[in-house]
Image (cartoon, rainbow, N blue to C red):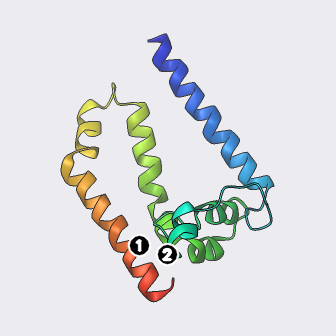
Amino acid sequence: MIRKNLTAVSVVIAVTAFFILLALVNPMESKWMPRCFIKFATGYDCPGCGSQRAIHALLHGDVATAFRYNGLLVVSLPAILYLAVVTLGRRRWENLYRKSTSNIVIYTVLVIIILWMIVRNLLGI
């Protein structure tokens, strides 16, 4: 039990530190922020391309710019937050957690991510 709590606390600290870093450092201007290997290797945007810039823009209240950087991330944030809460409380909401992480949900999300990658590269968004 202590180990699981320590893991959860560690994840929360790491995520908080990541958000603080992205609030303080503009990924567009930083030379040490990681770049997308897929974009570098292929020239194509991966589903996550622009996520750092989008989060930076969101942390500064600029939703329109964030949407231009990675629209899927912006519209997915409520689902991501929901899943984080359900995962942290999976013992309390075991049935909800099981439904939220079922194969059909996972495959649906995977298809959406693949379609997003195809569409954003074909349309240049």
Q: Nearer the viewer, mark 2 or mark 1?
A: 2
Which quadrant of the figure has residue 122?
A: bottom left
Residue found 52% across the figure and 27% down from its top: 8
- The kind of residue tagged 2 is Tyr
In the image, farthest residue toward the top: 2
Q: Is residue 105 above or below residue 71?
A: above
- The kind of residue tagged 1 is Met
Q: Is the Cβ of the residue at disc 2 closer than 8 Å to that at disc 1?
A: yes
Q: Give the residue number, with chain letter if any, for mark 1.
A: 117
Label 2 – label 1 distance at C-alpha: 9 Å
Q: Is residue 8 left or right of residue 87?
A: right
Which quadrant of the figure has residue 62?
A: bottom right
Residue found 67% across the figure and 45% down from its top: 18
Q: Is residue 58 left or right of residue 47?
A: right
Q: Is residue 24 left or right of residue 35?
A: right
Residue found 52% across the figure and 24% down from its top: 7
Residue 10: x %, y % from top left: 59, 27
Q: Give the residue number, with chain letter if any, for mark 2.
A: 44
Residue 69: x %, y % from top left: 59, 73
Q: Quadrant of the N terminus?
A: top left
Element carrying mark 2? loop
